[in-house]
Amino acid sequence: MKIAYLAAGAAGRYCGTCLHDNTLAAALTKRGIEILLVPTYTPLRTDEESVSLPRVFFGGVNVYLQQKSALFRHTPWFFDSLLDSPRLLDWLSRRSAGMEVAKLGALTVSTLEGRSGRQRKEIDKLVDWLKRDVRPDLVQLSNVLLVGIVPALREALGVPVICNLSGEDIFLEQLTEPHYRQSRELLKQRADDVDRFTALNNYFADFMTDYLAVDRNKIDVIPHGLNLDGHATSPPNRDRQRREVVLGYFGRIAVEKGLHIFVEAFCRLAERTDLPPLVFKAAGYMSSADRAYFQQVVRRVESAGLADRFQYFGELDRAGKIAFLQSLDVMSVPTVYHESKGISVLEALANGVPVVLPRHGAFTEIIESSGAGLLCEPMSPKALADALAELILDPPRAAECGRRGFEMIRKRHTADAMADLHVELYRRMLGKPLPATIASSSANGQSAAGRTSSAAPLSHQ
């Protein structure tokens, strides 16, 4: 079985989708699946050993230039390859603040138009390579913004195409008219060309059913799985009597992630006299475009006289990330938008850290199915502060939430579980029998992730 997995890079930053794709590809390789993780737009960046190919298709520079100038739609492929250099793309993306999404409307429409759009040459190069050099049994796309290439893939390869659903609505909802409407219409058209979709949770599967106007039965729910190497091997045993309580935020530094909401909650908590000493730690990628926002957050902390109790650790590698999470007593990522993945939350739970989250998106499903923390009213610093105080004042309850999260991750959110469910999906798509170990697991009603699929949706316990 040979899988061509087309993954969209995130312009030099860590992103949940890239982490998911790389972890999945590595786990599938261990199961004997021949999988090619193919970067598109920019190289993939992951905090684990990368298993992606050292080349990029649909390179961001070429895609942009072909959108802006007809000249670059006719340049020879060897010239394009110079602009697709992973080193060049990585260098440019790390030094760029990124373009406002609202300015990418015409480019988004063009790429969704496929070979009718201005990036036809990029599609032809990718399809030619897949047909001539790879000859995959199945193609998987990391998100629906790549579906413009599906008709060309089906025509040239004649193989099934699976597409992941991974929070694309956050990007699309920032587009302006007429590009927003055009993009939505094209997505609905192209969705009919995709054989199956996968989502990381029931919330997003249900949401995208309406967003793409597809049959819910066409979407398999396969929870994200973590590579647990280096994470905690047992729930932590924290003595709250011996030190201050550490509150933590781990996520991209951006207004939509809600760091400002957490800071307001922290300022409220610091005014209370019934709580132990508190410190606030934050970590995560920050683009140059978000520095002004971060400075506003810092000024709010300073105005409350809490500068000595707040620390930002910046972007962390894998070891730093795990150490950061293990230093926390409670974590929250109070997103403004409805979260579709929640991978940083799963990583916190893997280390036995209880969480407090807004009651929306994937967060509701995570907490209601695990009991690993508390839910609160979204976008409310007061509600977040009150929920955090509940756990701070009740250490046994906090410890129990952490223990439940720790156990839930190992039951349903491991890389092995995720890989098993993908192998099961691939076999079903290709009409091949399951390997004995996976077939036996299915027959016994066992699976990592509880045999989650469109036919057996994740339960809310």
Image (cartoon, rainbow, N blue to C red):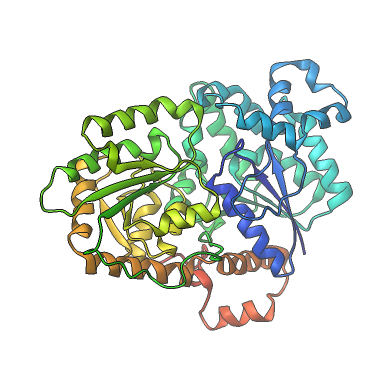
User: Is residue 229 positioned above or below 279 on the image?
Assistant: below
| Residue at the extreme left of the image, as rendered | 273
Q: Nearer the viewer, residue 348 or 245?
A: 245
Q: Is residue 370 left or right of residue 55?
A: left
Q: Residue at the spot x=52%, y=24% of the render?
A: 100
Residue 140 visible somewhere in the drawing: yes
User: Is residue 337 positioned above or below 436 on the image?
Assistant: above
Residue 30 found in image quarter: bottom right
Q: Nearer the viewer, residue 224 or 307?
A: 307
Instruction: Tell me residue 332's x, y (percent).
Output: 33, 50
Q: Nearer the viewer, residue 64 or 438?
A: 64
Residue 392 found in image quarter: bottom left
Residue 300 found in image quarter: top left
Q: Is residue 209 left or right of residue 147?
A: left
Instruction: Tell me residue 288's x, y (percent).
Output: 50, 27
Q: Residue at the spot x=43%, y=37% of the render?
A: 253
Instruction: Tell me residue 112's x, y (percent).
Output: 64, 33
Residue 113 visible somewhere in the drawing: no
User: Is residue 82 positioned above or below 154 on the image?
Assistant: above
Which quadrant of the figure contains the N terminus? Answer: bottom right
How many labels, in total? 0
Instruction: Tell me residue 393's x, y (percent).
Output: 17, 60
Which quadrant of the figure contains the C terminus? Answer: bottom left
